[in-house]
Amino acid sequence: MSVKITGYETHDVRFPTSLTGDGTDAMNTDCDYSSAYISLFTSSDLVGHGMTFTIGRGNDIVCSAIKELASRLVGKDVEELFANMGKTWEYLCADPQLRWIGPEKGVIHIALGAVDNALWDMYARSRNKPLWKLVVDMTPEELVSATAFRYITDAITPEEALEMLKAKAATKAERESTVRELGYPAYVTSAGWLGYSDEKVARLTREAVEAGFNHFKMKVGADRDSDLRRGKIIRSIIDDPQYLPAGKKPRDPNSPELIGKNAGPTGSVLMIDANQVWDVPQAIEYVKSLEEIKPWFIEEPTAPDDILGHAAIRKALKPHGIGVATGEHAHNRMVFKQLLQAGAIDVCQIDSCRLAGVSEVLSVLLMAAKFGVTVCPHAGGVGLCEYVIHLSLIDYIAVSGTMERNVLEFVDHLHEHFLYPCSINQNGRYNVPSAASEGYSIEMHKSSIAEYEWPHGSYWVNSPKVKGQQ
């Protein structure tokens, strides 16, 4: 008897992170990390969970869009959907009236990310595998059929992608074994939020070094003198061997994985993130003025879909040894295509649900591998760390074949709300998700939904409203 999708439910879940300054940056000053959450139900016990991330108000609008898209799946046979996930993704994109209010961007597109991710979660659960394992176990042909290629064949064709994947297929098992043993490299943002005091920045940086991290990111763009001061505080800690964990030796700044990253004497790396606050000329001059703190890259220096602006900034900063990264708000694969074609970025930062789910992420991973650009996904938020470790594992094992220079963002917030929270080992690396039942690792505790659902969850009923939700 075939299993069909019978229905869905959505939840507008909001956490009051603006009370503690978590997530603050020069653009986003009051962030209440929020999940527009969906569960897809079937005629069997099989369920799929997905979400997309917002920072508070407007989460209800995304939930409304999720309902419109999820309704297109009701009555569909799940095995027919799973048989060609690329075709399924195109079907979800194809409602002409919903497409009109994108197309393939904005609220509709991030809502599609939640629905597509829920379907991939269901697919992985149906095969008793974590999502990353489901995908890396696919044949090259299956993986290509699962990928969204529309509008990007001038950058990479399915035939090119197939050859790339076949070239890596024979050594997938070796890489899987390696990453299971070592974990996947991570970097920490938790110490560098703009709303933190200098004392808190210093304390959290020391704790991050002690936890094994050697890549650190701080927010910049509100005040140059403050940015320099905070950057020097972080550098004074991460560059000083006395703060390294007991028995841990400094890393060689000139090793292959660190060369070109402006690593300090302990092998530690600092990155900076402006969250889109500058015009192009302003970005160039501002970042030049921060050269003293030796950042590896500036993230989101200007508007996220200004391809030529990023290219100009990269060209101007290259003589100063500072790279450019973006992608957190790149709203579809076509923006990434142009960023890569224009030579506008040194680091590609995919987001697990700004892009419309796994099928679109696969297309960006393949393009980045073809262009030889390192992928360092955006995480943080709520649920994004749980999501993106799967995507980085897919990239390393099946697509690019390398994690030597890659680092995946880690933020130590809100993981306790998930049944399968991500975790970090003693060397500052993500552990590999390994539970057969976890799918895409995004299932939320029912108690967390009951407490934080807006506006009738127990927290919101019993607590004063926070700044972001007023």
Image (tube, rainbow, N blue to C red):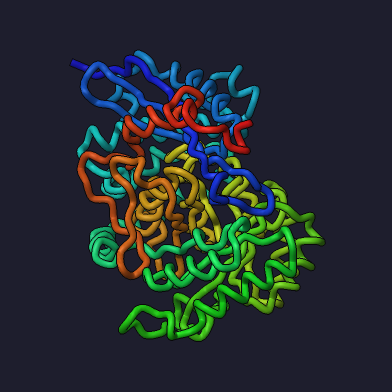
Could you tell me residue 256's position as x and y percent?
Answer: 45, 79
Q: Residue at x 29, y 55 (%)?
A: 432
Could you tell me residue 377's position as x and y percent?
Answer: 48, 54
Q: Residue furthest left?
A: 1
Q: Is residue 284 above or below residue 458?
A: below
Q: Is residue 305 above or below residue 175?
A: above
Q: Residue furthest right?
A: 281
**Can residue 210 be seen in the rendering of this structure?**
yes
The answer to whether 296 appears left or right of 185 in the picture is right
Q: Residue at x 71, y 49 (%)?
A: 303
Q: Residue at x 23, y 63 (%)?
A: 177
Q: Residue at x 22, y 39 (%)?
A: 437
Q: Nearer the viewer, residue 207 or 185?
A: 207
Q: Is residue 129 above or below residue 85?
A: below
Which picture quadrant has residue 447? top left
The answer to whether 50 appears left or right of 285 in the picture is left
Count of marks placed on residues: 0
Q: Nearer the viewer, residue 401 or 443?
A: 443
**Can residue 170 be seen in the rendering of this structure?**
no
Could you tell me residue 84's position as x and y percent?
Answer: 36, 32
Could you tell me residue 215's position as x and y percent?
Answer: 48, 69
**Where does the C terminus fall, quadrant-wise?**
top right
**Where does the N terminus fall, quadrant-wise?**
top left
Q: Nearer the viewer, residue 59 or 229?
A: 229
